[in-house]
Amino acid sequence: MRLQTMLHTVFPPECLSCAARVENPFAICSTCWSETDFILGASCDLCGTGLPGQTAAPGEVLICSECQSTERPWDHGRAVFGYSGIGRKLVLALKHGDRADIARAAGPWLARAGADLLQDNPLIVPIPLHWTRLARRRFNQAALLAWSLHRNSTLPMDVEPMALLRVRPTPSQEGKDRDTRHANLDEAMIAHPRRAAALRGRNVVLIDDVMTSGATFSDATRACRAAGAEKVSVLALARVGRDA
C-alpha cells in the first residue's frame, strides 16, 4: 500500500471549510463549493468582479460600473471568487489562521481564473508585507498563493517574491473608504533595489488574497511601472463587492 493511501486511510481528507469528508486532500466539499461565489461567467476585465447576466460579444471587453468611474493603472484583472460566504471564510482562515493548506488548494483556482493573464511567460509578483507585519504573521499569504499558482499551472512563468518592497507600515484598510484606502497606500511600495532588474521589460501579474478598492494593487502597479515593467495585470483570490 502506498504511503499516501495509508495516510488517507488513517487520516481521511477533510473539507477545507467545514471538515466534512472529501475524496481528495486540499479540497472543499460539494456543499461548501455550492456556497462559494466562484466567478465562472462574465466578469469585469479590470477588476475581475462577476457580471452575472451579461454576455460579451466576440472581441468585446466588459467593464463594471465601478471601473468605469475609477481609474485603474493596471491592464487587466481577474479574481477567483467573491469575498462572501465560504470564500470570505477561506481568505480569513488563510490570512489569520495559519492555514497554508488553503493557499495550496487555491493554486488550481488561480490558474483557471488567470489563464489568459499567464500567457507569454509572465513574472508573478506577490504583494509584499512590511517586515513588521511579516514578523508577526510569519508568512506572506500572497507569496504562498503565488508559489501555489506556479506549481499548479502548466504554463511557463517566473516567480519573484521579493520584486517589491513595502517601505512603510500601513494601518489596516478595514472600515476605510476608498479615498482613505488609496491615501493609506500611496507610495508604500517600491521595487526592491536588488530585484528591480527582474521587472524591467516583463509582463507582470500581481497576486494578492483580496481586492477591495484596488488601492494596494494600484500602488504595486505604480512601483512595477517605475521599474520598467511592460504590462501589469492583477489576480486576486477574492474580490470584494461594492455592497460588501
Image: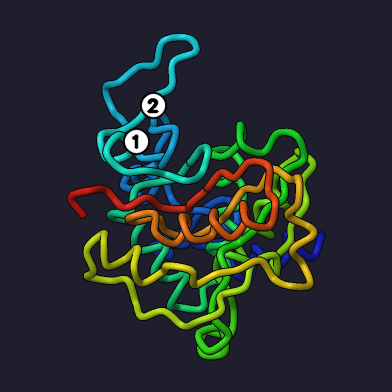
**In terms of sequence position, does the residue under pointer 1 or pointer 2 come before the other?**
2
**Which residue, as the protein is rendered here, is positioned at the far top?**
58
The residue depicted at 75 percent of the width and 34 percent of the height is 120
Q: CA distance from mark 1 to mark 2?
A: 6 Å
* The C terminus lies in quadrant: bottom left
In the rendered view, tell whether residue 143 sits above or below residue 151.
Answer: below
The structure residue drawn at horizontal position 70% and vertical position 33%, both measured from the top left corner, is: 119
Amino acid type of the residue that numbered disc 1 sits on in the rendered structure: Gly
- Whether 185 is drawn above or below 228: the answer is below
Say whether marks 1 and 2 touch (CB < 8 Å): yes
Instruction: Name the disc covering residue 42, or none.
Output: 2
Of 156 and 192, the residue lying toward us: 192
Q: Secondary structure at mark 2?
A: loop
Residue 92 position, x and y percent, is 39, 69
| Disc 1 residue crowd, few under 14, some 14–19, many 20+, Cα 10 Å | many
**Along the horizontal axis of the image, is 119 left or right of 185?**
right
Mark 2 crowd level (few <14, some 14–19, many ≥20, 10 Å Cα):
some
Q: Position of residue 197 (x, y in %)?
A: 79, 60
- Residue that badge 1 annotates: 50
Q: Quadrant of the N terminus?
A: bottom right
For image coordinates 36% across by 80% down, the residue present is 171
Q: Nearer the viewer, residue 68 or 23?
A: 68
Asked if residue 186 can be seen in this view, the reply is yes
